[in-house]
Amino acid sequence: MGKTVKKFMEGNDAMVAGAIAAGARFFAGYPISPSSEVAKGAAKELPRHGGIYIQMEDELSSMAALCGASLAGKKAFTATSGPGFSLMQENLGLAVMSELPCVVYDVQRSGPSTGAATKPAQGDLMQAKYGTHGDHSIIALAPSSVQDCYDLSITAFNLAEKYRTPVIFLADEVIGHLRATVSIREPEPGEIINRKAPAPGTTQKDFRPYDYSGNMPAPMVGVGDRNLLMRTTGSTHDEKGEFRPTPENIDRVTHYLMSKIEDHVDDITITREYKMEDADTVLISFGCSVRSSMSAVDLLRKEGVKAGMLELVTVWPMPEKQIRKALQQAKNVVVVELNMGQLAGEVRKYNDYGCNVIQANRTDGVLITPKQVVDALKGGMK
Amino acid sequence: MEGKFDIKINAKFCKQCGICSALCPKQVLEQEVGKVPVVAHPENCIGCKLCAMRCPDFAIDVEGK
Amino acid sequence: MKSYKDYMLFDKLPQTWCAGCSHGIVLQSIAAVMAELDVDKHDMALVSGIGCFGRVDDYLDINCMHVTHGRALAAATGVALGNPNLHVLCTMGDGDGTTIGGNHLIHAARRNINVTAIISNNYNYGQTGGQYSATTPTHSITQTSPYGHIEDNFDICKLAIAAGASYVGRATAYNPVMIRKLIKEGMQVKGFSLIEVMSACPTHYGKFNKLGEAARMLKLMNEQSVTVAQAAKMSPEELKGKLVVGVLKNEPRDDYYTEYARIIEAQRIE
């Protein structure tokens, strides 16, 4: 077990601590509320660990710089919120296509556009998956506590490195600015995943930084490797990283980018259950809404309702199995989220069981209350 | 007459743009529109290699004999 | 002695560009400088953007990263800071480097990122059919300025000088010897260097403006050229429509990484 210290800290600061514990040594970003404390923390902490902080001119360049640093072998991260996350979509696609691991902290706020800059929302759920153009899959994790901000950061970097993909850390203003006592446990070396390197002795002739034959990414080297040259492009490319826009190649690349994530959904999925054993009323939630949902479960239990909660920590790929199980188990499912029903739409996709799917939404920039969740259930109950 | 330099033109790479023949300071190369240049006056070549350096298509090599 | 061919993927030729396009001349110059400096390929990284000139990475046998339109310098910033031991080249066209990517250009210059930017300026967006860019000369014709271009154009070198680049130079594709000299010097400067190469696009810009075939376009730009020494003796009136070529600025200062390394040195706990 690594050394553990207790610290009273804010969610955004715990994200920085987690990133550094995971081995991140490069940050490029642009300040934006409510994520700015991540930049502040990164600027302070990274040089202390030999890492580099750079504040770019915008979020387009921040995401591009992340891609560059990742290609140079660094574990890289950025932090942003709605408007900045929109700008990052361009080069998030580059990271997907070039398979450059990195972590994007999106501390969600109310939108669209500037919206209510400092107020919480969870309206980026769909953008996290579908924001950049073209078919692809992505990994997104949603923390529901300050402890999560630390622990899940390590998970986020591990998944990014393992699957050579950008990972979205889908936080929100509530969690980002929440303060709590956190166990900062230094991870053991064995708990840290680094991108796979080519087998020793691999020659340039045999080196393939991309592999579309299966569903796992090829080994890669950072540029500057003494033996191998690395080649990447955002254009559809072959195994060597060379431009190849043939119909066959476009098709296999697209399928690969989906399957390298979707085929490993069991490995990537993290969910938590609360009082689910006998539940016939299930609340499904993620991020800050989980906190209200847990209290709502307790309120309902007091009233004699057999309520339980399914928390989606992994939100992309969508935990289909766990959602289906809840839909099969429950008569009523309430989807609790700070948006107009982005997760509810996903849940309904899987509802082959005639379950009554109710939405509990709040979109006024204030965290939904447990009572509102209970009221939503009662209003929609069959 | 033989020159001091060997000028090789790769017809596979050449796109017949005409830069080399038009800008050769010693009029060594001759070219008809739509054709690969020919080394018409090798004896005039001074080996400046401007034709090779200005060839956008990597089609010219000039080497001393 | 190495040849430029040692740094190229010669089996990828013939290259993709139109007949007479200057981009191939610039590409050969880049490879020739690497050969002249006898650099280890593993120490070289090239970041290129989107546009005709963005395709140079297809032909170079070094570390290559081909990114999105306009963002090459931003990605190059990440590469250069991610591995400060690399020589990072960044190749862009005028659309990529100064129009969509203009903001990144001034900030990379201001921060003095250790990158050698090479902009092949042919006054238009060639890949999409010859639309005007931020460097298209006023009054000229492009696909999207059929009645004459009404905007003023950027002087890329002046922009980079004002923004704080360490080294700035300009050459024309007529003069590949000067291109080589400038790229070589730029690569040897620690900090941000920018080399603008005036390039001919006979397919679009040349045709729209009745400039004739490639060789004539190169001759015209050579006639337009004045050296820094000549320019110093000319009035602003006389300099109108001229291209000042040569080394326009050579004032190296510590690059971003060198400065940042001092912070790391002072603050490091692990």
Image: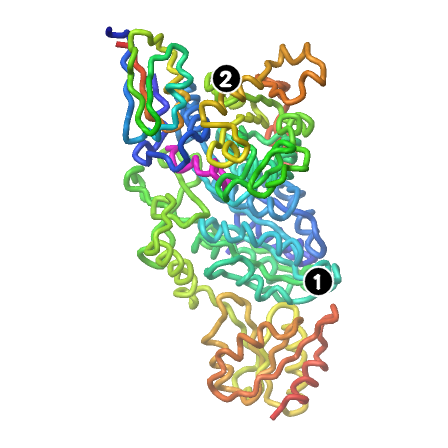
Chain letter of mark 1 equals A
Residue at the image position 33 percent from the left and 45 percent from the top:
A208
Residue at the image position 65 percent from the left and 86 percent from the top:
A377
Helix, strand or loop at mark 1 = loop
Q: Residue C189 versus residue C258: which sits nearer the camera? A: C189
Q: Position of residue B28 (x, y in %)?
A: 34, 13
Q: Residue A191 versus residue A159: which sits nearer the camera? A: A159
Which label lies toward us, 1 or 2? Answer: 2
- From the image, tell me which residue sits under label 2: C178
Compared to A381, does A193 lie above or below?
Answer: above
Compared to A318, does C158 lie above or below?
Answer: above
Q: Is residue C168 within the magenta segment?
A: no
Q: Position of residue C100 (x, y in %)?
A: 60, 42
Distance between mark 1 and mark 2 Cα atoms:
60 Å
Task: Tell me which corner region of the image, top left, top right, bottom left or bottom right, holds residue C103.
Answer: top right
- From the image, tell me which residue sits under label 1: A178
Number of other residues with Cα within 10 Å of mark 2, as a class: few under 14, some 14 to 19, many 20 or more: many
Q: Is residue C50 within the magenta segment?
A: yes
Question: Horizontally, is B23 left or right of C196 in the view?
Answer: left
Residue at the image position 71 percent from the left and 57 percent from the top:
A34
Task: Tell me which corner region of the image, top left, top right, bottom left or bottom right, holds residue B29.
Answer: top left
First to last magenta residue range: C48-61
Q: Position of residue A187 (x, y in %)?
A: 52, 53
Marks 1 and 2 on same chain: no
Specify the amino acid type for callout 2: Met
Chain letter of mark 2 equals C
Helix, strand or loop at mark 2 = helix
Question: Horizontally, is B17 left or right of C71 in the view?
Answer: left
Specify whether residue C181 is in view.
yes
Q: Residue C212 versus residue A149: which sits nearer the camera? A: C212
Specify the amino acid type for callout 1: Leu
